[in-house]
Image: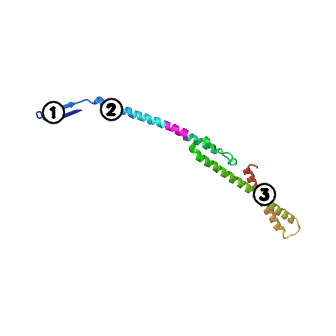
Amino acid sequence: VSSVTPLPLQSPGTFLVVTQDITSATIRHQHFFALLLFAASASLFLTAVLLRLVIWRGLVLPLQVLHRELDAIEVDSLGAHTIDADSQPREFDPIVRSINQLQSRLSMAWTRERLFVDGAAHELRTPITVISSTAQRLSSSPSGPTKASLDLISTESKRLSDLLNTMLDFARADAGRL
């Protein structure tokens, strides 16, 4: 680097020339900035690796555990197999409590449905048995014109009885009693 300054008190054309070699300082600065860039890149890489580890252990693994527990819930064990909120991270606490409450509500609804279907099948079976036995008794009587009607009653009551038996089998299968 050179600096040329005219000297006004001297004769015209007299200059003060100052020269300095800054090559080594420039090279030192370039090395310093390269080292600084390397250090920033290394710290960014290390931060990314540590952040990935923290996210993996703090979010992904607990979500996988929660997923396995949710997969373990069966229809027959609704309400009986609740998820332990204490074994989950506290961030999942509202979700786990909501899932457990949902399981409880579903279990109650499922039980009410089973009781209704079971009760309906039993309540409807009695009148069908009466209709069927009456139709069979009347069909054994020798009267001619009502025989076709009584056969129809007998056929339909058997069909209705088969439908109710199927409904009762479904209720028993759902309750695990089949």
Quick one: which residue is furthest to the left in this view?
Answer: 11
Give me the residue at 66% from left, 52% from top: 105
Kind of residue sitting beneath label 3: His
Majority secondary structure of the magenta segment?
helix
Q: Which residue is under mark 1?
A: 15
User: In whole angstroms, how far apart are the C-alphas of marks 3 and 2?
Assistant: 94 Å
Q: Which residues are magenta?
A: 50-58
- The way the protein has been coloured in the rendering is rainbow
Q: Residue 35: x, y in percent? A: 38, 32
Asked if the stretch drawn in magenta spans residue 122, the answer is no
- Considering only order in the chain, which callout, 3 or 1, is on the residue closer to the N terminus? 1
Q: Which residue is under mark 2?
A: 29
Q: Nearer the viewer, residue 158 or 18?
A: 18
Q: What element does badge 3 sit on? A: helix
Q: Nearer the viewer, residue 39 or 99?
A: 99
Residue 122 is marked as 3
Mark 1 and mark 3 residues within 8 Å of each other at the beta carbon = no
State which quarter of the image contains the N terminus: top left
Kind of residue sitting beneath label 2: His
